[in-house]
Image (tube, grey):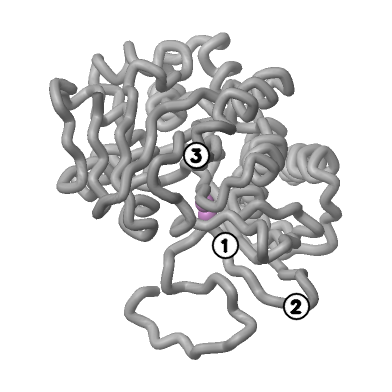
Amino acid sequence: MGALNTSDNPNVLVGLDTGDDAGVWDLGNGRALISTVDFITPLVNDARMWGQIAAANSLSDVYAMGGKPLFGLNLVGWNNDELPSSMLSEVLAGGLEIAEQAGMAIIGGHTISDPEPKYGMAVTGEVDPDKMLTNAGLKPDQDLILTKPLGVGVITTAIKAGIAGKEIINAAVASMIQLNDIASQVAVSAGATGATDVTGFGLLGHLGKMTLTSNVDAVLDVGNIAFLPSAKLYAEDGVIPGGTRRNLAWVEHQIDAGSYGETDLLLLADAQTSGGLIFGVDKAKTDSACAELNERGIAAVAIGETHAGTGTIRLR
Ligand code: CO
Ligand code: CO
């Protein structure tokens, strides 16, 4: 998309040029619409769970902008020759459960015939443009807060290989279907201006994009970063998705790894589906923001800090 010429429309507050989580359209009078779309292939065998994951994943970019979702449209690719329509009903029921939890209406959708199933949503949300969170909004000398553990890519690769046990699967699914609504609200009320959700490019990829566009460096306290159960063990055994390796290759020139080795770096670059938010807050707000998130059931931790800079991520 970067190669396309896009017109300058004054209503576009966030468009294609900054690679942000969603587009934002100014309505005037302190109101703006957020628009985003996402769909995924199946990650788990349970149809309803997959629907829940896909819906939470589609909603996440609205929360990553500091907004609230209003309504969504279902997007479905379905293999009618091999899969019963009752299974599709389960997928859509899972999506609806998550939409209801988010207070969002589903008002339409579209289905096509597709050999490999796909499900997601186009979501429209609303944000106060003065309180919007963007990739370019990190400031120097802030703490960085991450709101979910990493390792989804490794775990879903283990699921596809048939080696992940039930408890491990359940922990990963619980993390993926957890909405980023509370994380977003707490980030906004703590005065954050820079945030993104950790998804396909992994923590290092998304943070690398943020540090470049925000003109800061980041220092990560690797020991503070939480991982899903068994993610480290699988990674050490080489259970690493291709996307995770590509993420690391893409961002490696920005990384000062210190004494950390390749497996650590791959875990930090692991491609996530429906990952948590990472946002920056002034240091005086860190403890209260983390305490509120933890109280409300979000496993948020401070994982490092920013300094004025040019996009380097140093691991310590
Ligand atoms: Co995003
Ligand atoms: Co997305």
Tell me, for residue 27, which label it has, or none: 2
Residue 170 is left or right of residue 204, and the answer is right
Q: Look at the numbered discs 2 and 3 and tell me whether their residues touch, using CB distance below 8 Å.
A: no
Choose top left, top right, bottom left or bottom right for residue 133: bottom right
Specify few, some or many for label 1: CA neighbours under 10 Å numbering under 14, 14-19, or 20 or more: many
Does any atom of ligand 1 lie closer than 8 Å to the CB of label 3?
Answer: no
Tell whether circle 1 marks a residue whose Cβ is less than 8 angstroms from ligand 1. Answer: yes
**Image point 33% across, 79% down: which residue?**
3
- State the residue position of label 3: 278
Looking at the image, tell me whether mark 1 or mark 3 is earlier in sequence order. 1
Looking at the image, residue 164 lies above or below residue 161: above
The mark closer to the camera, 1 or 2, is 2
Query: CA–CA distance between discs 1 and 2?
Result: 16 Å
The secondary structure type at the circle numbered 2 is strand
Q: Tag 3 or tag 2, which sits nearer the N-term?
A: 2
**Residue at image x 71%, y 36%?**
182
Is the N terminus in the top left, top right, bottom left or bottom right quadrant? bottom left
Can the viewer see residue 191? Answer: yes
Neighbor class of circle 2 (other Cα within 10 Å; few <14, some 14-19, many 20+) is few
Measuring from the top left, give residue 304's x and y in whole percent.
Answer: 38, 30
Q: Is residue 289 left or right of residue 104?
A: left
For mark 1, what is the residue? 22
Q: Residues within 10 Å of mark 3 (few under 14, many from 20)?
A: many
- The vertical placement of 303 against 252, above or below, is above
The front one of 118 and 185 is: 185
Measure the C-alpha gap from mark 1 to mark 3: 16 Å
Residue type marked 3: Ile
Q: Secondary structure at mark 1?
A: loop
